[in-house]
Amino acid sequence: MNPTAMAVGVVLLIIILGACWYVSPTLGLTALIGIIIGGVLIGFGTHFVPVGGAPAAMGQAPGIATGVAMLAAGAGLAGLFGGAWAAEQGMVVAVVTGGIGGGLMMAITCMMVNFVYVYGMGIPAASGKVLHDPITGDSQAEYKSQGTEGHGLPFVSFVGGVIGGILGGAGGTLIYLELLGLYEATFPKMMGATAAQVMPVAVAIAGMFAVALFLVNAVLTAYNITGTIEGPHDPKFKRWPRAIVASAVASALCGFVAILIVAM
Amino acid sequence: MEHIVFGIGITALTGALATVAGSAEDTESNIGSQGDPNSQVQLAPQMGFLHRIFNKAVAGEPPAYGLWCALGAGLAWAFMAMQINAILAIVLGCVLAVFVQGVYATTAYLGRTASLAKFGQPVYVDIIKSMTTVTMAHAFIAIFCTVAICQLINGALGHPFPLPLLALIWGIALGAAGSATGNPYYGKERQYQNQKFGAGVPISASGNIVRYAEAGERNSIDNGFFTHKIGGSASGICFGLIVFLELWRTILFERIYAGWGAIAVGVLMILIFTVVDRYIEVWARKNYGPYTVPKEADA
């Protein structure tokens, strides 16, 4: 970890928060803090998602055979879909609903990945990074086929995927709700229309910014992971602190832009 | 009660459409060779194995399908605003989106294959002629079903997101589910059919993909025919379950305890899938056994 880079990140974060306080000290600043928390949840959650990339597609490495950002986005956005639907039921219910939506998407996907590996290809799950599964205690080394780093999704990777989906879905929903609240409060005066008239516009713009912020944080974390990760037991997981700072800064900057369209 | 019955009917229809979409998406990406296994199609000529496999990794499947579904939905939305019938509008929007997919497929094949010229890999014009249309046909099914799902969710179930945004979200989810479930079957089981069944591909074998069929050289339509039976079906079930269960728990249980009912059912379903996954994992360990003698026994 690079302490100087972390310090620079924290200073940037404070500067952006200060700028937001200057242009919109109440509504905007509250929304920005929510957006930063949501972005950090997405960034942290992406580290849990077991992604094997191209090697996993040939059964050469454990994980899901697709990209980090792609899978995290798929799960998180499925969560955002559910969370946005539950927005009328209050922030807590909506955020939890979004998290469960993302977790459910990942649970189904991870289960089907193991289904294809086991019943379609006759290959058992095996981790390449640990000798024993940290949750079940199952030995892994002898279940790796020759010349590979493992394959499929050991149980710890499955659990990691579900946790990643939950955090991503909750984070994405939180960003959406914060922006929706801000736009609902400011659009009627700005556009000279009633709250009901501006609602579709507020929902659409908040949704687009939420999707965009999700992709920003997922891609940023993919760079931190550098390709593939097996889940929370992978040594690369320990890199999460720097991703947290980077996600906070990126979310703050993007969120500030989303706030400026109503604050200026 | 009527509202719930109507919602369940729509949920069942969206689940069926999602199953077809997932299956078509995986088969399209395998015929076009778009997912992660395409790394081997790109690698093979560099290792001296020239082939006649399509090569169109435009982007990862999730952003590609996010784009095509959002495009189809956006155009359908515009047509509906012009008072065109919803079904016709969706068909027209998806046809136009598929043309964009076809352009991407053609330029991707030409560009990626031309970059392999120094390794002697030819650009086969007959492959473009015969296979691009097959990927476009499968892409149309996947995009149409996804946009239809989004129209049902937006129009009939009342989700607040506009149609193009819903299509972007579900397009990305479709690509994520399809690539996660279907890629290993295409990558390991089809491209490396010459390797041992029941084991991963040794890293040393990378690039040595199967290039010959029962008669003549293997092409990508053969790959689609082979993979749709398990990879395509599994992808369809995966995306179908995601869409169906997400809607089902919301429609039936969102009014119970002010939303907490749907959350509790979601948690329960996650636990059920966790148990099923663990069963599959243990079943494989018991029935297939280890590849090597455990280290403890060695000692």
Image (cartoon, coloured by chain):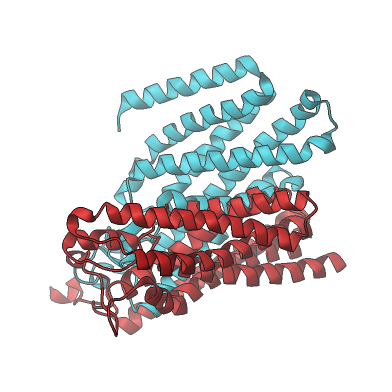
Indicate the position of residue B68 as horizontal and vertical percent values: 55, 54
Which quadrant holds residue A192? top right
User: Is B75 rendered above or below residue B4?
Assistant: above
Of residues B168 and B241, the one drawn nearer to the viewer in this rendering: B168
Residue B27 as seen in the image, left or right of residue B287: right
Indicate the position of residue B41 as horizontal and vertical percent values: 29, 63
- For the C terminus of chain A, the quadrant is top right
Which quadrant holds residue A63? bottom left
- For the N terminus of chain A, the quadrant is top left
- Regarding residue B125, the answer to whether it shows in the image is yes
Of residues B109 and A246, the one drawn nearer to the viewer in this rendering: B109
Of residues B7 and B35, the one drawn nearer to the viewer in this rendering: B35
Q: Residue at x 58, y 47 (%)?
A: A170
Of residues A238 and B56, the one drawn nearer to the viewer in this rendering: B56
Palette colour of chain B: red
Which quadrant holds residue A230? bottom left
Q: Residue at x 71, y 67 (%)?
A: B11
Chain identifier, colour cyan:
A
- Count the marks: 0
Indicate the position of residue B79 as horizontal and vertical percent values: 72, 52
Q: Residue at x 53, y 64 (%)?
A: B139
Residue A109 as seen in the image, left or right of residue B3: left
Residue at the limit of the structure toward the top, as seen here: A22
Q: Residue at x 24, y 59 (%)?
A: B43
Indicate the position of residue A15 as horizontal and vertical percent values: 50, 18
- Regarding residue A85, the answer to whether it shows in the image is no
User: Is B192 rendered above or below residue B153?
Assistant: below
Residue B179 as seen in the image, left or right of residue A27: left
